[in-house]
Each structure stands twice: as structure tokens, then as C-alpha cells.
Amino acid sequence: MDEKDWNILQTLYEERNITKAAQRLYISQPALSYRIQALEKEFNTTIISRGQKGVEFTIQGEYLVKYSKEMLMQLRKAKEYVANLENTIKGTLRLGASGMFARYELPFLLKNFLYRYPNVDINLKTGWSSEINQMLHREEVHIGIVRGDYNWQGKKVLFREEHICVASINQIDFDELPSLSRINYQTDPSLKNQIDNWWQETYKVPPKISMEVDRIDTCKQMVLNGLGYAIFPSICVKKDEPLFTAPIMKDGKPLVRNTWIMYRENTLQLAYVRAFIDFLHECSDLN
């Protein structure tokens, strides 16, 4: 059983389908089936069963999948450590970032980082901040850029604070908000909770939601066309856009959205991880 077999088991476990797993692995379906049969012969046990709903793993198969995941992780760490022994800063930085940060801030940061360190490759995953936090816990990424406050026992550095604000094409009167049309968008639960808690503490009636859209960019276009107001983090409002914005206040202070850099301290042994952390410190608004 080797690295190829570990990847086969991991991919098949994720897909639960022989055809889809073979496509992901760039091998033929018969070749994949043959390799599974060879593994079953090697371990003298049944690894999978096939039914109408796809592939199911036996108890023995589940154990081998867990073993494969651990071995792939150990192999990846060994490769990273060996590559790090050279003097030049090079390697593959596994980065997880909040989708909103990736949309508005990350491209510029990565462009400048790679200009400085051209021998570093970036393996980027984006998603809700809650998803990035889970990737960190599973050690799928070296560094997570997370918006909002999440439980993390490793290193956690505040990168940026930004206001949460009301945006409209008209001047904003907070007393009138309950009677005005609001446009909502899908967002990370932590931001939604921040906004909802502020509203409930400020007003006695629910907001007048006129539209529900899937993306913040779509929401902003609706606002720019005068179809209602929205509540945005200031990261997504450009200075040249014809919008009136006003920060939300709570207990006399602006309501803020924090962006955190999170990582395990032992990953600083990798020169390219350490270089990226130092680079982010240089770019932080909080230096």
C-alpha cells in the first residue's frame, strides 16, 4: 500500500462513486476497480460494497481510509520540512480565506507577496469563515484568514478592524430605517448575528426586508440602483461609489468586524509560512 493507494481510498471515500472517483484521479474505472480488488487481496478483507446508492465502506475499509488520511498528512509534512531545509524561500503555502476577504483584499496581497517571493506556490481555499476555521482544525491549511470571532487555541493575530455600516444612495436617518426597504444577502452566520443583535437592541419592530439575494455584490448593485438600503462591512464599499454610508453605533462606539490571521505556531518552522505571516504584519492596518 503506497501514496497512490492512499489517494485512491481518500478520493473514493469522498465521492462514494467509482466513476466520479476515477475521473478525479485521471484513471480508468476498470483500473480503479482492479486496484481496490488488489488492496482487498492484500489485506484479506472486503473494503467496499456497491449498492444502488453508490459505494459503502466496510468497518475495515473505514479504518484504511483513516489510516490513508494520516499517512498522506505525514507525507505532506515530511515533504514540506525537507523543502524547507534549503536556503531559498519556496514551497506550497496552503491558505484558507474568508470569501469576502478573498474577493476584496486578498488578490492585491497575494500579487505583492508573490512578487517578493516568486518561488512560493499558493494553494488557496475560500469559504465562509466558519468553514475556514474548520479547515484549520483539520490541518488542511497552514494559515486561515477569518472574519469574526471564532474559537481557536493556536496563534491568533488581529489583522484589521472595519466598521459595519448602513449604505444607501440617499442620506441615512437611522430613526427611519424600520420603515425603509432593506436588501439582505447571504453571509457568514457571525456577521448575520452581529447585525441581527444590533437591530433587536435598537428597534422594537423587525426590519422591512424587500429582497433576499445570494451575494453581497448583487445586493450592492440593488442598493446602487435605489431599490433599498443594506448593511455592509466597509471592506466592500469603494470610495468612488456613489453611496452614503454611516457606521452602526453600539454603546457609543462603532460596531466593528474583525479580520484575524490564525495559524499553528509550529508551522512557523516553514520559511514560506513565516514569510507570509511577516508580510501580513507589514500590510496590517494595526501596526
Image (spheres, rainbow, N blue to C red):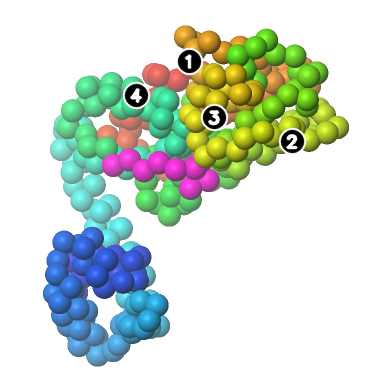
In-image side of 201 versus 132 (left or right): right
Residue, disc 2: 197
Q: Secondary structure at mark 4?
A: helix
Q: Is residue 98 above or below residue 252?
A: below
Amino acid type at image mark 3? Cys
Q: What mark, if any, has residue 219 been given in the picture? A: 3
Earlier sequence position, callout 4 versus callout 1? 4
Tell us which disc is closer to us: 3 or 1: 3
Tell us which disc is closer to us: 4 or 1: 1
Residue, disc 4: 109
Earlier sequence position, callout 2 versus callout 1? 2
Amino acid type at image mark 1? Lys
The span shown in magenta is: 123-131
Instruction: Look at the numbered discs 3 and 1 and tell me whether their residues touch, using CB distance below 8 Å.
Output: no
* Residue drawn at (24%, 41%) of the image: 92
Query: Disc 4 to disc 1, how far (Cα)?
Result: 17 Å
On the image, the x and y values in percent for residue 66 come to 36, 70
Tell us which disc is closer to us: 3 or 4: 3
Query: Disc 2 to disc 1, how far (Cα)?
Result: 26 Å
On the image, the x and y values in percent for residue 76 come to 25, 54
In-image side of 266 versus 11 (left or right): right
Residue, disc 1: 238
